[in-house]
Amino acid sequence: MAEIEMIDQYRVDRVITDAIPGERKTYVVIARRAGPFGDDPAAQEPQVVIKYYILRQGYPGLNMAYQKRIKKEARVLTALSNVPGVARYVDHGINGTHRKGAQVDSICYLATERCLGRELFDECVEMRVFGGRVREAFSQVAGILYTINNAGFAYFDLKLENIMIDYANGGQINLIDFEDAMELHKVNNALQLRRYNVGTGNYRPPEITRHINPCDGIAAAVFSLGVILFTLVYVNFPFTDAEPVNSTTYRLIRARNYAAFWNKLARDYNSVIPLTGELRSLIYRLFAENPLHRPALSQVLIDPSLS
């Protein structure tokens, strides 16, 4: 008989990711609130996604850092609770308990609604995003990001893996994992405190890699949006290096050598939608090295290449 795994009042249904010693410290599971619901799915509590960190004896500083992360993300998600397309906050605990059989761990955790569908990354890799679906998915992501910014927050970990798309529900998109989100007016202090360790390497704009201060949190996400658009169009990442700023491909954009840039792409990739001049122009502008030269999200949403 399988051991019952519990996180406070939640019963774990499935493990999504385990922490890796020396690398990833985060555990993620799918769970539901325990109760006398029997086997009738209609009577059971809805599933949630729980992210948690184990609090270890002898590491008070690290434990406190984990607890701060959880509290901050809970605060951000609570503030964004009325924003469509953002995973809903459910619960959090900074001194929780994880039980599996005889093993008991002290943890801190965050529970959010389980967004249905699959990661946009998986859908893209399996070539299920094509034609009008490319423009529709991209426009949805840009619209959600625009609303998040208007609510006063920057989202620094925009990537395909943090975008859930549900084609069984009309292609509905939700953004998940707001650990790297922060209030816009606190962006520069927060980035310095974290030594600019935010986001994911191959989505990261030059100003984050170079630790440029002040940093515009909205413009930084627009660059990541460019990586998403390119990847949806070509089913490949635009930059092969861990950081875009170090990529040979990005050097061509930085030098405005657009002919060489598109010739290289034509040799290496095939696009899943027609590559119009308007679409090329939008990609250039999203990837602008100077954040001031990137388009505002309001401009992106009405760009003719997306109509």
Image: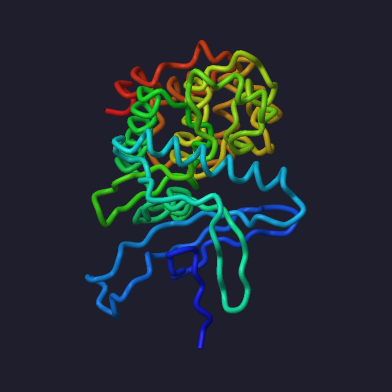
| Applied colour scheme | rainbow
Residue 61, how many percent across, how many down?
A: 72, 43
Residue 56 vs residue 14, the one in the foreground? 56
Residue 103: where, in percent of width, then height? 63, 73
Q: Quadrant of the C terminus?
A: top left
Q: Residue at x 46, y 54 (%)?
A: 122
Is 158 placed above or below 168 here? above
Camera-side residue: 111 or 214? 111
Residue sitting at the far bottom: 1
Is 171 displayed left or right of 212 in the figure? left
Seen from this angle, which residue lies furthest top? 292
The residue closer to the viewer here, 27 or 247, is: 27
Quarter of the image for residue 264 reads: top right
**For residue 58, above or below residue 32:** above
Please give the name of the residue rendered at 61% of the width and 60% of the height, measured from the top-left corner: 106
Identify the image quadrant of residue 277: top left
- Residue at 29% x, 46% y: name it: 172
Q: Residue at x 29, y 80 (%)?
A: 39
The x and y percentages for residue 92 are 46, 50
Q: Quadrant of residue 267?
A: top right
Drawn side of residue 209 relative to residue 296, left or right = right
Q: Nearer the viewer, residue 93 or 87?
A: 93
Q: Is residue 262 left or right of residue 114?
A: right
Q: Is residue 210 above or below residue 240?
A: above
Residue 55 percent location from the top left of the image: 65, 55
Count of labels shown? 0
184 relative to 201 in the view: left or right: left
